[in-house]
Amino acid sequence: MSEQLDHNEIERLTSLKNRERMQIPRQPMPEQEPDVRRTNFQEVPYGLSAMAAVIEANRCIQCKKPTCVLGCPVGVAIPDFVSRIAEGDFEGAIRTIKETNMLPAICGRVCPQEAQCESQCVLAKKGQAVAIGRLERFAADWEREHKLTEVPPVGPDTGKSVGVVGCGPAGLTVAIDLRRAGHAVTIYEALHAPGGVLAYGIPEFRLPKDIVNAEVDVVKQMGVDIKYNYIIGQLETLDELLERHNAVFLGTGAGLPWFMDLPGENLCGVYSANEYLTRCNLMKAYEFPCCDTPVAASDRVAVVGGGNVAMDVARTAARLGAEEVYLIYRRSEAEMPARAEEVHHAKEEGIIFKLLHNPVRYVGDDQGRVRQVECIQMELGEPDASGRRRPVPVAGSEYTIDVDTVVVAIGNGPNPLVPRTTENLAVDPKRGTVKTNLQTMRTSKPGVFAGGDIAIGAATVILAMGHGRQAARSINHYLASGIWEIDELPVPCSGDGTG
Ligand code: FAD
């Protein structure tokens, strides 16, 4: 990171014509070799070097109408920060990013850029998009490693206070923007650590917890008070919070695991992805017995699902020492919801993909421990409501795989505790999400706003952050006007602190 910059080369690069820029190949990201990383929990990619970042940034042709920005739910000024990296001005780059995104080291690592900003890059249509995510990560890491992290200014005290339930990306983002506007903010978090899924779900080898903690530290330095081990709906109700605060934001996420209701799901050794990952990430089971919480030592693990969560579980199981890790997914690779990069990494690490297969039951021994998973082969039929071709079982194709651990990673529903313990908070009866106007982020209950996975179901970090920003604008408007019944927010005026 502290490598010297070649200023002559920077001068040459910045004076290139657009057609020459478009000839520069996308810069590769160095990473740990698969057989090495399968034995450790350290981060897989090392990040771009300073000169590689400069070269990558010089691939950007600075479009007059930058569509990449439209692809970013928090509206990061992408061409501006990229052009600063192109000139070697890394401090300017991170300042630009942080005007709209205070969690850039996190987003640079976990955002599905290929489906968001990078998918809109003009270069993507002609070949490979500018590596916007890698550049964002570079700028954030450069700032942290050079100890240049700045705490954003906080507005004059408004005398208003807001309670935020949940310390995931939605809660953190709304808290930052409300503090910027000068309100007092308290976050109530059920767990003993901040970050939500960033802390308990996404593994260390994809998102080191030091990085989450460093970004949360800035939030604390802004004066946001975080109360841990504080479960709203048990310790206190939402209505009690409303007595203490002028408004409340609900960002409780989607942490309720789904199961398939198969015979044998209650056997020992059958985990939900949430439990398995929480034990490993938040409780650091991979350091057991140095840490208190163990996780089953397994030789043969079956992971059911095809999303990012399933990839995280499979790759975690491999690192915990399992000889064989099967990923059982009922559709084909083309329909897999996981990011292409995660699938690629999982395959490199030796995960065995059982595509177009589905479990039908789990078989246990006389001690009640899981010993086998019975699967059936599937074939793709007509498209279903999701637009993907429906997987149909192939009669008579059942077979078994010997396993000692099964992890079910087929999805999560919204956390039901707060809705169940709160009157007049409307919930979608089918999906369990809190009904939220996605323009104003207002719920059915006056004074209560919501966003992130609790409002739309399991989604992405950056969408949760986008909701947090939008909710902060709406809360500012509500606190200033006292008016609850609105359908849309006025256009932001400069200086409302939330962009
Ligand atoms: P969360 O992150 O779930 O945070 C909610 C917080 O609220 C939690 O800390 C929880 O403890 C707390 N809480 C819940 N109930 C209460 C209560 N009653 N009282 C107090 N606190 C409460 N997205 C990506 O963009 N990229 C990825 O690579 C990616 N990988 C993922 C991997 C895994 C394993 C999982 C599970 C999800 C992944 N996601 C990914 C999805 C992403 O993490 C979520 O969409 C995002 O974290 C949602 O943010 P949130 O703030 O709404 O909720």
Image: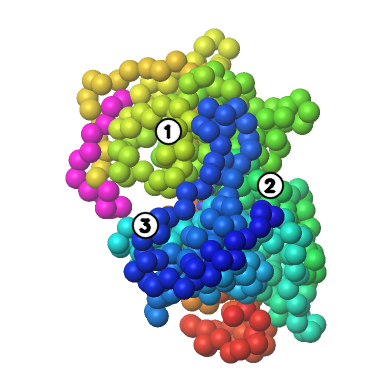
Magenta range is 376-388
Relative image position of residue 8 (x, y in whole percent): 56, 66
Q: Disc 2 vs disc 3: which is toward the camera?
A: 3
Which residue is pictured at 27% across the width and 38% down the height? 391
Q: Disc 1 vs disc 2: which is toward the camera?
A: 1
Marks 2,3: beta carbons within 8 A: no
In primary-sequence order, the first of circles 2 and 3 is 3
Structural crowding at the residue carrying mark 2, measured as other residues with C-alpha within 10 Å and reported as few (<14), some (14–19) or many (≥20): many
Q: Give the residue number, with chain letter if any, for mark 1.
A: 347
- Residue 421: assigned label: none
Q: Give the residue number, with chain letter if any, for mark 3.
A: 128
In the displayed structure image, the side of residue 496 where residue 129 appears, left or right: left
Secondary structure beneath disc 1? helix
Relative image position of residue 59 (x, y in whole percent): 43, 64
Q: Name which residue type carries label 1.
A: Lys
The one of 36 and 117 positioned closer to us in this rendering: 36
Rendered view: 246 above or below 194: below
Q: Is mark 1 within 8 Å of ligand 1?
A: no
What is the C-alpha distance between the residues marked 1 and 3? Answer: 22 Å
